[in-house]
Image: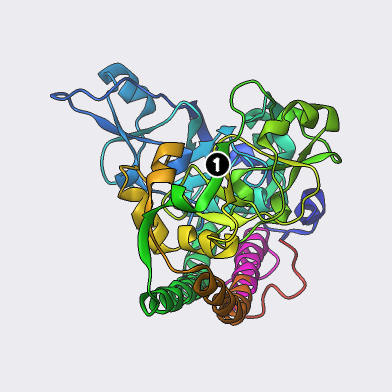
Amino acid sequence: MTDVAQWVHVAPAQWTRGRIKNLIASATNGTWGTEPDEIGDNVHCIRAADFDRNKRRAKINQAPLRSVDASSFRNHQLKPGDLVLEKSGGGEKQPVGMAVLFEGPGKAVCSNFCARISPERDADPRFLTYVFAAAYGQGLIQSAIKQTTGIQNLDAGAFFSASWAYPGLDDQRRIADFLDAETAHVDRATHLRNRQKELLSLRRWAHFQDALDATPTEIIPLRRVIRSVIDGPFGSAFSSADYTLEGAAVVRLGNIGFADYKVSEQARIPMGLYAKLRYHEVKAGDVLIAALGDARNHAGRACVAPDLGPAIVKGKCFRARIEEGVADSEFIALLLSSPIGASAVEGRGSTRSMINLEILKSALLPVPSLGEQQRLAADHRRIWGRTAAAIAACERQLSLLAERRQALITAAVTGQFDVSTASGRNVTDGVHA
């Protein structure tokens, strides 16, 4: 992380030394308004969910419509060139404090968990967006975060008072133009790598589908191949506040990938609490199934539980015990994780985002004989090994591209090179985002 006091001291001599707030004309908390009026003049309300976090832009077309009275709208209206700053929310892997540029068009406000930032007249909005991106990448914003009851809140006053150095308006525009062009190159490369990952994943399931299509199967409900299935405890049984570094493992949604158990997401609870929740116990070989999904991860995806020692399944997840001599756990997890499984779950009336035990048990699936299940699972394991290695290589490249993008932004807005003579290729050598 670049030390702010350090770089401000060595920034170009002609740059103004001051504070981030010198670049800001006003900061106004947002509003949520009321339910949209069917005959009224509704406006879009930008939330953190409507941020393009890579390009640092507000996505107005995806923002919900809300009814905001005329007086409130005048006070909160977003104008092209304003920034939207997330002030409350965030999470462990995505701290609060990101800011995006609003370019319009259309009538919009930002939500009450955000703030509208209007740049000073001598501050270029794109440059200010890159300043916020650099501050976020440096951890400067995170140092102004206060966290209570699991919610992160940004102390905007403390952040705005942080030391900063900045050039005149013309140089700000040159830096913004340079970064617009250079980050576009990085974004194109990122898009291609993401597309490659998608195609590799599709190839994985295409192989599985082809192999299954060539195998005699019987269409049966899932309940026919499972001995028992339970969900995790809900309500006040325990919360994240009970997690410890040692103790019994807790299987959460984050652990359940597509036929892959993600150990990196492991949580634990005290053994005394585990003893009270033994009904929800997980054993090696159980099939773990996600009850919740989203646009990328369908509800019903599954994996096989590794040997976790003492373990339980958490709410929003299911633990299924497979009927021995009838089904293979690895095959059933593959089937549920595949597009075949997603379609079967949807076919039972699921919204894709949530399923219950009845939907799961009633899902109609093509199931071959036990021997064929084991053969298909072994073949998939062999083919997937090569595909997974290629996907991992893409992920490493994506990580490097993200680091490159952040380093480029930080180096440019802190004056570590002259954008008028830089090509963007080697300017970040030795620079830390």
Foreground pick, 167 / 259:
259
Provide the residue span drawn in magenta.
396-422
Residue type (three-letter) at the residue carrying disc 1: Val
In this view, which residue lies farthest toward the front? Answer: 325
The x and y percentages for residue 240 are: 70, 31
Q: Quadrant of the C terminus?
A: bottom right
- Does residue 262 lie above or below 121 as drawn? below
Foreground pick, 423 / 309:
309
Q: Quadrant of residue 421?
A: bottom right
- Does residue 143 lie above or below 220 as drawn? above
Q: Label 1: few (<14), some or many (≥20) within 10 Å?
A: some
Label the magenta part by its dominant secondary structure: helix
- Left or right placement of residue 74 versus residue 116 in this view: left
At mark 1, the secondary structure is strand
The x and y percentages for residue 84 are: 47, 39
- Left or right placement of residue 258 versus residue 60 in this view: right
Report if residue 360 lies within the magenta region. Answer: no
From the image, tell me which residue sits under label 1.
Answer: 229
